[in-house]
Each structure stands twice: as C-alpha cells, then as structure tokens.
Amino acid sequence: MTKISISISVLSFLVMVSVAHADPQKLAEEKQCLICHSVDNKIGRATGFRTIAQKYSGKADAEANLVHMIKKGGVGHWGYIPMPPAGWKRPAVSEAEAKQLVDWILALH
Ligand code: HEC
C-alpha cells in the first residue's frame, strides 16, 4: 500500500512539473536534451535542433518517428553516436512531453 501511494505522489508530482512547463525550451533543459543538443549546432556532441528541423519538417511521419526516437533512442540518422533512450541516466519523458518537444523542434527550421 505504501509503495502504491508513494508511486501516486511521485506521479502527481511529475504531472505537476510537466504541466508547469509550457515553455518547450525549458522542458528541453529540464529533460537534459540540451546537454547534447543545442538549438543552433553550438555544441558538438549531437546535431542541433534547427538542423534536425530542416531535415524533417513537412514530412508526414516526422512527429511519430521523432517521438519514438526520443523515448527509445536510436542511431544512424546523423552518424555513429547513438542517442540513449529518455529515462536512461536522464529524466523520463512522457508521450505528451515528447510530442511537445518534437513540435517545438520541427518549428525551428
Ligand atoms: C547523450 C546525448 C543526447 C541527449 C541527452 C539527447 N540526445 Fe537527441 N540525439 C543524440 C544523438 C547522438 C543523436 C543522433 C542519433 C542518430 O544519428 O540517429 C540524436 C538525435 C536526436 C533527434 C533526431 C532523431 C532522428 O531520427 O533523426 C531528435 C529529434 C533528438 N535527438 C531529440 C532529443 C530530445 C528531445 C532530447 C531530450 C529529451 C534528446 N534528444 C537528448 C544525442 C542526445
């Protein structure tokens, strides 16, 4: 019982935190995306979000593919360095948060 109520309070805390961040760039900071990505290729580890937007924006399946990529990780779209799945040494990202991040990224082009 205690475990369940702890999980519920953690969950409601997470919901509150995600609702509190209407600004997607802040969400990207909080989810630690900006450790590897910058908006404009200012850091080297991963491709900048604007470049990613230029590749995918306007493509019909872009949102679903990128949401999947954020949640599950992947490699080979930009090079040989893999992106780890969200939740692995970084905060977990819900479906709604991943969508919010993808919509923000795709609008950067
Ligand atoms: C540990 C470093 C790292 C972190 C943290 C990280 N990424 Fe990535 N990301 C990468 C790398 C490396 C790639 C390129 C992978 C590839 O070539 O397929 C990538 C690729 C992407 C892509 C393009 C995917 C594609 O299919 O072309 C998107 C979108 C993306 N990341 C969004 C995010 C978001 C949003 C977050 C935060 C929730 C995040 N990333 C956190 C390293 C990272």
Image (cartoon, helix red, strand yellow):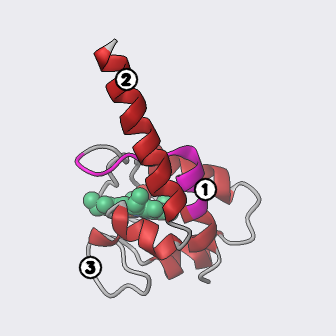
Residue 96 visible within the image: yes
- Figure check: 67 above or below 58: above
Q: Within the magenta stretch, is there residue 95?
A: yes
Q: Nearer the viewer, mark 1 or mark 2?
A: 2
Circle 2: residue type = Ser
Name the foreground residue: 19 vs 24.
19
In what element is the residue under mark 2?
helix
Question: Which residue has dot 3 on it?
Answer: 44
Look at mark 1 in the image and give the residue it sits on.
99
User: Does the beta carbon at disc 2 come under 8 Å from ligand 1?
Assistant: no
Distance in Å between CA atoms under marks 1 and 2? 28 Å
Q: Does the segment drawn in magenta span residue 46?
A: no
- Describe residue 75's horizontal placement relative to residue 96 as left or right: left
The quadrant of the rendering that contains the C terminus is bottom right
Residue 22: image location, x then y, percent? 56, 69
* Up/down of 28 relative to 87, above or below: below
Q: Which residue is mark 2?
A: 5
Image quadrant, ligand 1: bottom left
- Which quarter of the rendered picture does the N terminus lie within? top left
Q: Which residues are magenta?
A: 89-100
Percent of width and height locating residue 99? 60, 56
Residue type pointed to by label 1: Lys
Left or right: residue 34 compared with residue 11: left
Q: Residue at x 27, y 44 (%)?
A: 88
The quadrant where residue 79 appears: bottom left
Are there few (<14), some (14-19), or many (20+) residues within 10 Å of tag 3? few
Q: Residue at x 59, y 72 (%)?
A: 104
Report if residue 66 is visible in the image: no
Which residue occupies 36% across, 73% down? 37
Q: Helix, strand or loop at disc 3? A: loop
Residue type at mark 3 is Gly
Across and down, in percent, residue 72 comes to 43, 42
